[in-house]
Amino acid sequence: MKSLIRLYILPTLLLFTLSFTGCLDNTGPDPDEDDPITYPHTQNPGLSANDFLSDESFTKLEVEIDYMPGVAPDEDALTNLKSFLELRLNKTSVSLMEPTQIPSSDQSTYTANEIRELEGQYRDHFTQEDDSTLRAYMIIVDGSYEDGSVLGIAYYNTSAAFFGGTYEQVSGPALNQPSRSLTESVSFRHEFGHLFGLVNISGSGTDMQTDHQDDEHGNHCTNDNCLMYYAMENSGLFDQFLGEEIPSLDENCVADLQANGGK
Ligand SMILES: [Zn+2]
Ligand SMILES: [Zn+2]
């Protein structure tokens, strides 16, 4: 499988972007060679982009969802995520599994490595190479990211984490605050955008068809109306850039996905 070979040989040093991207953490450990799971799931975000986007290796997608007490995902946000995945991915079916509650770790903040440990503890479903279903994982924790700046992070090639504690801070009923549902919808879609290789993630195969990378902010789009604009996952800027609707991917981001097998 072409994409699998690519996953193994790619360097894991995308570290230079870390301080700029915030919502993309690629400092995980190298894959464990004794791991009985056949499809690598601890690679850098973006490296399974083609497996998400095209139907070459996998025709279906299934997403496992774990959440801590008090931060169950908003149902409308999950519906919005599903429609986004169906719109952009060449899959005959996309399914989100029934969210499962896991115990709280009783922390106010979580590091990316702590999130990885939680995945090791609680993730139940893994992609098998001889299967037609690609499996992804979402975890919603009850605190904030270590530096509090982001709503979510993509941290492995098929995994993203979301920070329920930060959702509580940025969303709410006040006039100038986005609703919880809108906040989660944008956040879920944005992090999956990174898993699809946006914007210009090295080794993802999702190459820019037109230059539109916001170099100052890592793997983000220059268009402030685009889902992949950096402020869309930044807890301090989120409400200032967000309108009343979920921002779409702009045409440049869509063109990049299409060039790597997406719709
Ligand atoms: Zn981002
Ligand atoms: Zn864009």
Image (cartoon, rainbow, N blue to C red):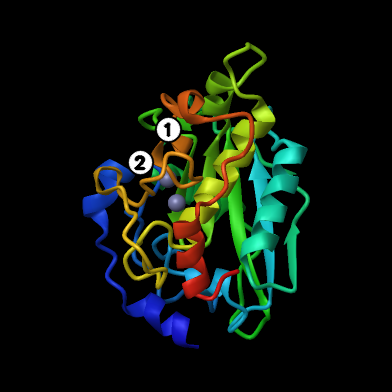
Residue 41 visible? no
Q: Is residue 249 above or below residue 255?
A: above
Query: What is the spatial separation of the Cα atoms under label 2 and label 1, in whole angstroms?
Result: 8 Å
Q: Which of 34 and 80 lies nearest the eye of the viewer?
A: 80
What's the amino acid at mark 2? Gly
Answer with mark 2 or mark 1, whichever residue precedes in sequence.
2
**Horizontal and vertical percent for residue 236?**
41, 24
SS assignment at label 2: loop
- 75 vs 167: above or below: below
Against 254, residue 246 (above or below) is above
Q: Residue at x 57, y 15 (%)?
A: 176
Circles 2 and 1, Cβ within 8 Å, touching? The answer is: yes
- Residue neighbourhood size for the residue with mark 2, other residues' Cα within 10 Å, grouped as few (<14), some (14–19), many (≥20): many
Residue that carries the numbered disc 1 in the rendered image: 234
| Residue 158 locus on image (x, y percent) | 53, 62
What residue is shown with label 2? 22
Q: State the image coordinates of residue 229 (x, y, percent, origin top left).
A: 42, 43
The furthest residue to the left: 16
Residue 148: assigned label: none
